[in-house]
Image (tube, rainbow, N blue to C red):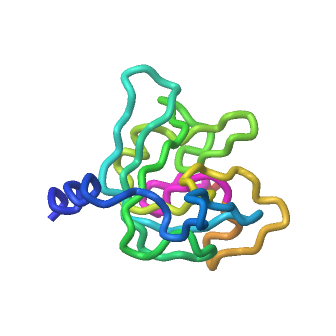
Amino acid sequence: MRSHLFAALFTVVLAPAAMAADGFSATAPDGNVVEFHVLTVSVPSKLPNHCTVTAMIAKVWQGTAYRAGQPVLLNVPCAEYGLVSANARDDGFTPVNARTLQQSQRGIARLDDRGELIWSHEGLRQYGLWGAVAGYRVLDTRMLPTPIRS
């Protein structure tokens, strides 16, 4: 099944669903918040860098540029380290841990209409138990760091 989905990525245009009449999309100030299933992750040979995540949108929390079932390609900052192993922020470059990213099955991201990650979350609303969303976040609870209890 994964091979069929992956093949579909090359036959489907990976552009957002909503485009302006002139062929360019206008990004809403808050962007789009999408939850997705991770299909594949390509890690470059030299880190830190950007990993390529191929995903299928499962739920659109905000915005109109994407739809459930749509494939997307995301460029996510990644490294061999990561202070927060399952979350990426661009303020000071906190990348997702590349191995965590490769093992993940679900994610959530804030995107502009062209598929670029939006890193700002100031004053933004909460999305269920995920809270405010900025950049890219792994949603697999088995992969999140566990708090140390004393």
Residue 143 magenta-highlighted: yes
Please tell me whether residue 56 is drawn above or below residue 126 in the rendered image.
above
Q: Is residue 63 left or right of residue 10?
A: right
Residue shown at the point (52%, 26%) measured from the top left: 48
* Secondary structure mostly taken by the magenta-highlighted segment of the chain: loop
Q: Quadrant of the C terminus?
A: bottom right
Q: Quadrant of residue 57?
A: bottom left
Q: Is residue 79 left or right of residue 70?
A: right
Between residues 54 and 11, which one lies in front from this camera angle?
Answer: 11
Image position, residue 91 (x, y; %): 75, 40
Can residue 111 be seen?
Answer: no
From the viewer's side, name the closer residue of 117 and 23: 23
**Which sits in the foreground, 12 or 43?**
12
Q: Which residues are magenta?
A: 134-148
Residue depicted at 42% across the width and 62% down the height: 106
Q: Is residue 23 left or right of residue 14?
A: right
Q: What residue is rendered at 37% in x and 22% in y? A: 45
Quadrant location, the N terminus: bottom left
Q: Is residue 50 above or below residue 117?
A: above
Considering every residue shown, the one lying at the far front of the view is 22
107 is within the stretch colored magenta: no
Q: Work out which residue is located at the far top of the displayed protein and give it.
A: 46
Residue extending furthest right? 123
Q: Pinpoint residue 96: horizontal percent, then vertical percent.
A: 53, 42
Q: How many marks?
A: 0
Vertical relation: 125 (above or below) 75: below
Residue 114 visible within the image:
yes
Where is residue 24 shown, x and y percent of the image? 60, 57
Residue pictured at 38% horizontal, 54% vertical: 104
Of the pair 130 and 14, the residue shown nearer to us: 14
